[in-house]
Amino acid sequence: MVFNRNRRYHDLNVSIREHIDERTEELMEEGMPQKEAAQKARREFGNPTVIAERSRQVWQWPTLESIWADVKFALHQLRKSPGFAITAILTLALGVGATTAIFSVVKAVLLNSLPYKDADRIVAVWTANDAGDGKPHPSSAGDFAAWKRSGILADIAPSYDDEHTLTGQGAPQLLIGYAVSANYLRILGAEPQLGRLYTDQEDRDGGPLVALLSDHLWRTSFHADPAIVGKPITLDGKPYTVLGVMAPAFNYPTTVEVWVPAAMSPAAFDNYDRTYVRILGKLKPGVSLAEAQRALNAVEAQVAAAHPNTDRSKRVVLVPLREQLVGDIRKPLWLLMAAVSLVLLIACANTAGLSLARDAERQKEIAVRLALGATRLRLLRQFITESLVLAAIGGGVGIPLAFFGTHFLVSLFPNEVANLDIPKIKQIPMDGGVFLFAFAITLLTAVLSGIAPVLRAMRTRADTAMSDSRRGTTASRQQNRSRNAVVISEIALSLILLTAAGLVVASFQRVMNATLGFQPDHVLSIEVLLPPNRYLPSDQSKTRNFVSEVTRRLNALPGVTSAGATDFLPLSGFWGTTNFLLRGQAPPAPGQEPEADDRAFTPEYLRTMQIPLLRGRNFTADDRAGSQQVAMINQTFANYYFKGKDPIGEELNLGNAGKPDWWRVVGVVGDVKAFGQDQPTHDDIYRPFDQRPLSLVAFTIRTQTDPEAMTKAAERVLWSVDPELPVFKSISMTTLADQSRAVRRASSALVSVFAVLA
C-alpha cells in the first residue's frame, strides 16, 4: 500500500463500476429500460464511497492513513503561510539547537557515567585547616596511616606528584607523572590495554623501577609500539621497565602521562609535618559520605590530640569523585543550562503567539468543519499534528545548529591552564543520549507552543465563529487576553534573562578591569623542572649557576628588553606557602601560625614583569647565598601585618620558635593576582632566588616584538646551557592571562548570546 496505493484505488473504482454495469445489463436483459436498470443496480449495490472506504480499510491502517492526511494538511498550511512558517521554524530551531548544545556539555561533564568501577563510592580525601583558609589540601603520610588503621573506608590509597624527564626518545621531555600505590589503581578499577598493573610487592620502598604509560604518551613518544611491555625507558637518567599501557579512557588525574609506584617507606607514615599526600578512598557499601566523614573526623580529633603542633584545627573533607573531576565548571554549566532553558521557553511562547495570531484567521475554517460534523476530538488531533510537524521541522533544523555550537563550547575547557580546576575536554560528543534529549525537547516545544492554539480551537463554537467571520476579523476580547498573556510571559522571561546576563557581563567586566599587578603584554615565559638526578637538592650551586647563566644569555638576545626568573609563575597553577612569625610576636597556638605564599625571583624579574616597587629596594646581585637573608613582601601583607608601620628593616622568622630562620624585609612590591583577576590577593613573601633556589624555574622574557616569535631562540639559549633539559611549557603571559579568564569569558559570551536571542 505504500508504493502502489493509487493503482489499487483505481482498480477498486474500476471494479465497483464494472459490478454496477454488469447488474445493469442483467436487468436490461430482463426487459427493464436502461435508465431504470441503472438506478436499480446502484440502489442494490449501495453507496460506492462507503463500500470503497470499507474495502480500503481491509488493505491499510486507517488510523495511520488519517494521521498521514493530517500531516499533509499541516504541511499544506505551512506552505500557505510561508512568513509564519519560516519565523516559527527558525525560532524553535534556535531554542532547540541552543538547548541541545548546552545539554551535550552538561551530559558529557556532569551526567555521563565515569569510566571507573563503583565510581559513586570513590572519594578524594583531603584535609582542611579551619585556622587557615579552610580549603581542602593534601594530607600528611601520618594522617593517611591513621585513617587507614581506622578501617572506616573499604580501601584507602596514597599518591603524590612525581614529574619525570624522559630521555632517549628524541628531544628530552618533561612528563607529568604520578606516584600511586598499587591499591590506588585497584580502587579506580583500572585495566591496562597492554600488559599489567604493578603489584603490592612491586609497590614497596626499594622495589623495582617500573612504570605505566598513558595511551597518549605511548602513541606520541613510542609510536604505539605493541611490544613496549617489558622494555626499559629512561626516566631521570634511570631505567624503568614498562609494565603496561593504560586504556585511553583512563585519565585520572588528568594530564598524567606516566604512573609509578608510590613506594612509601614505613618511616614516612610517622611524619605529620609534610602535607604532600593526595588520598583516594572507597566507601563501604551502605555507608554514606556524611557518615564516613564524621567517623574520619573523630579519628582525626584523636590524631590532633596526639600531634597538636601539626594537626590542631584540622578536619577531614571527603569529596565525591565526580565532584572532584568536575571542579570549578559545575556552577557555570548549570547557569548556562538555566539561561538556555529560558530561551527555549521564550521560543515556545513566541511560536504560541504566532500560532494564536494565525489561528485567529482560521476561525471560519474551524466553524465550517464543526458545522459539517467534525468532532472536537478530530480538531484536537489536527491541531496537535500541526504543532508536532512545526516542532519537528524546527528541531531538525536545530540539530545542525547544536552540532556547530558544541565546537565553540569546547572553549569553556582551556586545557593549558593549570590553575583552573576543570576537566580536560577536547571534544563534546553528540551521542544517542543527546539526540534523545533533542527529541524530548522537540515534543516539549510542540506541547508548549501548541497548547494555547489548541485550547482556543477547542472553545470555538460554530455559530459564533460564523457570525464573527461575517462581521470581520477583529479579534475578540478573549483572543486578545490569550495573546496578551503570551506576550507578557515572553517579556517577563526575557527581562529575567537580560538582567542575569547584565549581572554576569558586569561581573566579567569588573574582572577584566581589575589589574593583574603585572603587565603581561610582550612577555614570554618558559617553565622548566630541573631533574633531581642532575640538579641535586643537596648541592644547589648547579641550580644557581644554571639560572644565572641562562638569564645572562637571554638578556643578551636581540629584541629582549629584560629577562628574569622565578620559581612560581603567576597564573601557572604552581605555588608554595610558608609559615612565618614577626619579631616580637608571641608564638601562636600550634596549627594557627600565619601563612603566606612563598616565592623567589632574580633581581631582573620585577623589571621584566613590570611589578611596581612601592617601598625600599629590589634584590641585587649581592643578595646571594651566604650573605644576609633578605625578603620582600607585597602590599596586602604589609597592610595587614604592619598596619601603617614601615615594614622596611623588620624581620620575618620563616622557621619556628624553636629553630628560627630570620629574613630582613628590604622592600614592598605591588599586589599580584597570581591566581586570576577574580581571586583574592594572597599574602606574599618574596626571597632572592639565589638564597632559596628550587628545581621549578620559570624564565620571563620581555620582548620588543611578538613574544611567541622569540620562543625558539629562547629555548635554544636554555639548551645551550643544558642540552638535555626538557621544556615544560613555553607560553606568552598574555595568552596565559586570557586562558585564566576563559571560563568566565565563554560563560559571559554565551549568556549574552542567549539574552540577545531572548
Image: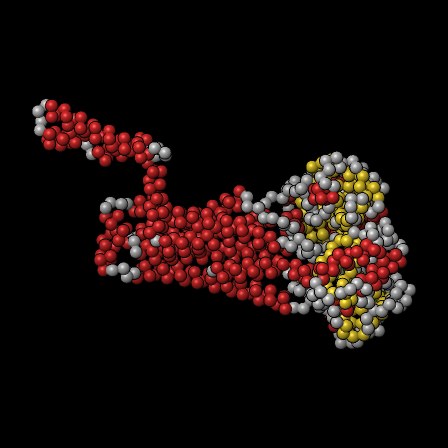
Q: How many marks?
A: 0
Is residue 598 visible to the viewer in this orientation of the structure? no
**Where is residue 369 shown, x and y percent of the image?**
26, 48
Q: Which residue is painted at 75% across and 35% down in the image?
A: 227
Left/right placement of residue 107 relative to residue 628 reads left
In the depicted view, which residue is nearer to us: 589 or 654? 654
Please name the residue shown 52% across and 60% down the image: 753
Going 54% across and 52% down the picture, which residue do you hit? Answer: 405
Q: Residue at x 72, y 52 (%)?
A: 126
- In the image, taking residue 755 as reference, residue 139 lies left or right, namely right
Residue 354 position by quadrant: bottom left
Quadrant in the picture for the N terminus? top left
Colouring mode (rainbow / by chain / secondary structure / one colour): secondary structure
Q: Check the image and name the residue furthest to the front.
A: 558
Is any atom of residue 481 visible in this view? yes
Residue 547 is situated, as x and y percent measured from the top left of the image, at 83, 60
- Is 10 placed above or below 418 here? above
Image coords of residue 750 (percent x, y): 55, 58
Compared to residue 458, the image places residue 154 above or below, namely above
Q: Choose between 715 and 68: the one closer to the eye.
A: 715
Left or right, residue 635 beside residue 497: right
Compare residues 230 and 355 and report the one nearer the observer.
Answer: 230
* Image spot of residue 265 (x, y percent): 84, 45
Q: Is residue 77 left or right of residue 580?
A: left
